Amino acid sequence: MKLKKTLLLSFLVALFFACEQEPSKVTVSSPEQQNQIEFLLTATGQPAYRVLHNNEVVIDTSTLGFDFQGHPTLSGNFKIINTTTNNKDETWTMPWGEQTEVRNHYNELSVALQEQTTSARKLILHFRAYDDGIAFRYELPAQSGIDSLIVMDEHTQFQLTGDHTCWWIPGDWDIYEHLYTTSKFSEIDATTKRNHPNLGQTYIPQNAVNTPVTMRSSNGLHLSFHEANLTNYAGMTLKVDGDQLQMTSELVGSDRFGFKAKIPLPFRTPWRTIQIADQATDLIDSKLIVNLNEPNKLGDVSWFEPKKYVGIWWEMHLDKSTWDLASGRHGATTENTKRYIDFAAANNIKGVLVEGWNTGWERWIGFEDREGVFDFVTPYEDYDLEEVVRYGKEKGVEIIMHHETSAAPRTYEQQLDTAYSLMNRLGIHSVKTGYVGKIIPKGEYHHGQWMVNHYRKVLEKGAENQVAINAHEPIKATGLRRTYPNAIAREGLRGQEFNAWAQDGGNPPEHLSIVAFTRMLAGPIDFTPGVFDIGLPSKENNQINTTIAHQLALYVVIYSPIQMACDLPEHYENQPAFQFIRDVGVDWEKSVTINGEVGDYVTIARQEKGTDAWFLGSITDENPRTIEVSFDFLPKGKKYQAIVYVDSAEAHYKDNPTSLKIEQMDVDHTSTSTFDLAAGGGLAISLQPIEE
Ligand code: NOJ
Ligand code: CA
């Protein structure tokens, strides 16, 4: 009742239908009133919005509109014909995730508009105000005589109120695997990131950024811009106007068709989202993106179990073995796979990924014509698929399938049915897919509508066959894991692999302290942590730019329901630190971001689902740092034994990365402790309840 009253009040106070020239304004506030969205029509009848946080404007008047092929621009001459309000306060359950229960609590305003011109087109705008941010989407209703539209451009503006500090990657249409740059908004120059030598495909047409892009204002407010529920549409980059401090949507296009998207009517665009937080840590705890997606469509997905995995993978990136058979150094042999299975079984690891098991790798990178090359059902002659599956089952270890499509999605689609029914027959419930290279057919990009629909088809086919998808070179995560919980993880960032071969020296120590507040807001990340042989002796110009404690901390800091222990089994032999990887959970009842600043450091604690165990991870950038941890996240009245893995006093990511202390202490919810992290360092704590 109280909720209804406040809602009513905010609508009544804010509803103005002023005289013809004056803008009309309607507002909606979040449940606790922190965030407010104002919808208005400009003097020319163009739809626009503003966003306020604690009564201060954080996004100033920003206009909305579209260009469609064969129709006049959809922007001015609108009149409000109706407004409706709605609100929701529900709690839903994640089948796997950072937490079991998620509260979805918002107030919604829908504004129906109609052009006052002869075309009299209709447009509905939906705004949702949450306490952790805001979102809006366009609805293009059925219009007489039009059953589809060709989107030439979407013109969604985001008018910033200051020259914020930004953490950004370029608006690449083909890949997200760029390092983040920290700069003032006015200094963003994405076109300087063109031609990276280590990207198999990259296309940065203009000065734009990809999302999530995170910003901090001079008074410490954090904003992160992204999109939710990207369905049958093109991915959105944000064009940067540094002088006007303005961003405008720039959809990824198709050169093949010469447009951005073709949409059937009625149509709802993805949500355009802004997470708003007084402190950086609140961005990580926000569930805005998943909340904006539809409920689980798949029902019971217990056939997929969150798990740690090892695999025939890092050895290829280190050039120790190869994916292809012809080299004579083939990694994916039956014997080698069994070695990994044995290692997994002995160490509480339930999955083994095998890359390079199938025919086609002889015509992978560098080949123009990759159509019809990879075969997703035929193993190389030295790999007995049925036998490794059988052997794994005997040891309680599941094989993780690998499908590198080499960015030839039509070839992949032709084989989806047979490939997934083979997996289903063998009881293989997850696949890592890959899309290295320029998309075939030419003129399509990884993040365009055509590929968005391909990635969706793969998810749907996967679901039909009880197959969960971990996509590399993917489309960005937009919270679809709520609807399709077989979307378990993806890459979509500079992963660990770059440390093995990037010509720019690999990921800097600050990388994951930025990723946690940017890419990770979109969804789970298959980063593949856990390198113990940090110096990479076989790679003259590369090493991992973190300490070993930092690698351990990533199992908690970086969220994914699948976590790789990516190093070679022999590098884990006789390593006391490996106990943390054996112990650490992968599926969580609760997660708490304890402290952190974007690009500097971050500390997260998570309670393992179904147990009372907690795990904590903390990482720092290139600066050593003392981290204070209050254990107040632990349940009251329970004592815990903490095993602490932390950098030693001499540790440093550059020249002493493996120097680590392992200590034990007892703590409870009243305890606080400080821990010294080295440059590029970390802290990992495993907390087990002491039964009394
Ligand atoms: C790129 C992926 O990111 C990497 O993990 C994989 O090993 C190769 N493609 C081969 O598929
Ligand atoms: Ca990759």
Image: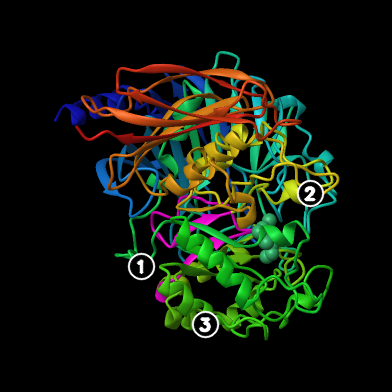
Kind of residue at disc 2: Pro
Residue 126 versus residue 100: which sits nearer the camera? 100
Q: Quadrant of residue 657?
A: top right
The residue wearing badge 3 is: 387
Can you say which quadrant of the picture contains the N terminus?
top left
Q: Main secondary structure of the magenta part?
A: loop
Mark 3 vs 1, N-terminal side: 1
> Residue 592, position in %: x, y?
39, 31
* Label disc, if present, on residue 303 of the rendered structure: 1
> Residue 444, position in %: x, y?
71, 65
Give the label, 3 or 1, closer to the camera. 3
Q: Which residues are magenta?
A: 464-490
Q: Is mark 2 within 8 Å of ligand 2?
A: no
Label 2 Cα crowd, 10 Å radius (few <14 / some 14-19 / many 20+): some
Instruction: Give the alpha-carbon distance from disc 2 to disc 1, as whole Å.
Output: 42 Å
Give the label, 2 or 1, closer to the camera. 1
